[in-house]
Image (spheres, rainbow, N blue to C red):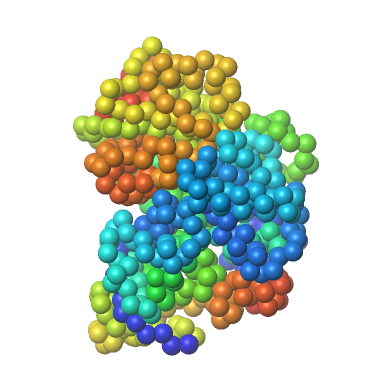
Amino acid sequence: MGKTMAEKIFENKTGFPVKAGDLVIARVDRAMGQDGTTPLAIRSFEEMKGERVFDPEKIILILDHNAPSPLESVSRLHDLMRDFSRKFGVQLMEVGEGVCHELMVSRGFVVPGDLVVGADSHTCTYGAIGAFSTGVGSTELAVVMLSGELWFKVPETIRLNLKGKLPAGVFSKDIILYLAGKLGADGATYQALEFHGPVIENLEVEERFTISNMAVEVGAKAGLMIPDEKAIKWVRERTNREFQPVFPDSDAQYSQVIDVDCSSLSPQVALPHQVDNVVPIEEIGEVPIQEAFLGTCTNGRLVDIEVAARILEGRKVHPEVRLIVAPASREIFLEAIKRGWVETIVLAGGVFVPPGCGPCVGTHQGVPGDGWNVISTANRNFKGRMGNAQSFIYLASPATVAASALEGKITDPRKYLR
Amino acid sequence: MILRGKAHKFGDNINTDYIISGKYKFKTLDMNELAKHVMEDIDPHFYEKIKPGDFIVAGRNFGCGSSREQAPRALSAAGIRGVLAQSFARIFFRNAINCGLAALECDTSLIEDGDELEIDLLTGKVVDHSQGIEIKTQPLPPVMVDILQEGGLIEYFKKYGSFQGVRR
């Protein structure tokens, strides 16, 4: 009987035949922590009397969620991470380097076939290059930093076949929002997703991350894609590490197989306060907005800034709207500067904040006011997520966010992209 | 191990941002400080309603969203002894057990807010004294029972030093 990608990766990492449902102890290839979760992991590490880490090369700590620090208490937690990094020789990405999930792939830390854990739920992002990557808690990160191992339940897999051709003005974000609406916030709990089909094949690798990133929004443990030539080339440009890509067997056993024709998909919007509360843009009605946010591990990449710049070029952001942009990494920021997109966006009235998570997690830089509607490229619209429980967050693609910023209301971007 | 306490009822899809908001959890490792803000965005005075040993009773997908371990830890620090839900998001489920917070999957539809509950962690039996009913829970995998019995993952790892002896 054939195996899924998840089963085959766990088989490689344990050295035993495994099947969905098995409980396994597996060695991880990389472990990641960010500034919201690592301080607690360090505390747990100390409580367990940790004296060394299993392999400093395989642990990456990143300051991105609350960076640069807005408060002295946060600065102390950042210093705790810096001290840990120096003491154990662990790599640390400083303030302004970018969002953890962008850096893990763009700096070549993760390769196809890897098993990666991260103390952040969106660690599932790296599934787009064929790695099994999943979020863990702080104490689990501490245990991994000590021993290099963790227990896993090998998940069942839902296979999604994305067929047809994506229409102009419709993007990978619209696909995953549509799927979130279809599957529901717990539609894939305890399971992995495998994305297949011509729609995925035709996406650039950068665009694929958006889809895998949001696998956790339907409860999935991982959001895997075939490491095709495009993905392998993308990875080889970033690392010299040897790797063996893993592919599912043609007769793999899936818990569900879902076919979706993307040919007539519209731009999608997730309404407050749940990611699966999704409607096509034609049904949105009149929704005025006061803030527009472009960035995050979901949509802060070069392709995202490019489409926003195309829409904003020579135009002005609506006077009632604050447009905030957070590039996902320093390299993306630099490239966007070189290509003139930063200038275009700033001239249109946008505000750039440092590469990092920006206002997504509600700690600084763009906390909305009472009663505000925010249109955001992020992955979560929970009440209070951006720091004010009296505001309303709508999720959409970078194109929809840019078009909405211009008009001061949620707007179909297709008229700007003809 | 028998636990007794009162039910605080919540609905479906209670995410970890609701359990403890990002604006608090990034600032401190002091769980007693975070405890004062549990569930604040959906029930502003929830902390004041908790008596030590109480339970949260919820619908589907409890603990979805962020991986923050501060969520189960802040609930514990606030006096919550366990969570009963129709289902859990997987990271929260693991974090809860790793922190020694009981997390049990069962049919919670008949439990009302304020009900007096009694939970036997070993047999997984829940008794709702207010409704006069008994509810069966999904058994935990053996590895999780072991971690819970040691009082959490830190204690488990201090004792065994690895997962190699774990029951599967």
Residue occupying the point 55% across, 39% down: A99
Residue A92, horizontal then vertical, whole percent = 66, 45
**For residue A41, above or below residue A321:** below
Residue A183 visible in the shown view: no
Q: Quadrant of residue B55?
A: bottom left
Q: Which is more toward the observer, A160 or B36?
A: B36
Q: Quadrant of residue B110?
A: bottom left
Residue B9 visible in the shown view: yes
| Placement of the N terminus of chain A among the 4 image quadrants | bottom right
Residue occupying the point 61% across, 49% down: A79
Residue A141, horizontal then vertical, whole percent = 62, 59
Q: Quadrant of residue A119?
A: bottom right
Report whether A109 appears left or right of A392. right
Q: Residue placed farthest to the top in the image?
A: A314
Report whether B135 appears left or right of B144. left
**For residue A11, above or below residue A277:** below
Q: Which is more toward the observer, A417 or A70?
A: A70
Residue B160, horizontal then vertical, whole percent = 70, 76
| Placement of the C terminus of chain A among the 4 image quadrants | top left
Residue B126, horizontal then vertical, whole percent = 38, 83
Residue occupying the point 33% across, 77% down: B51
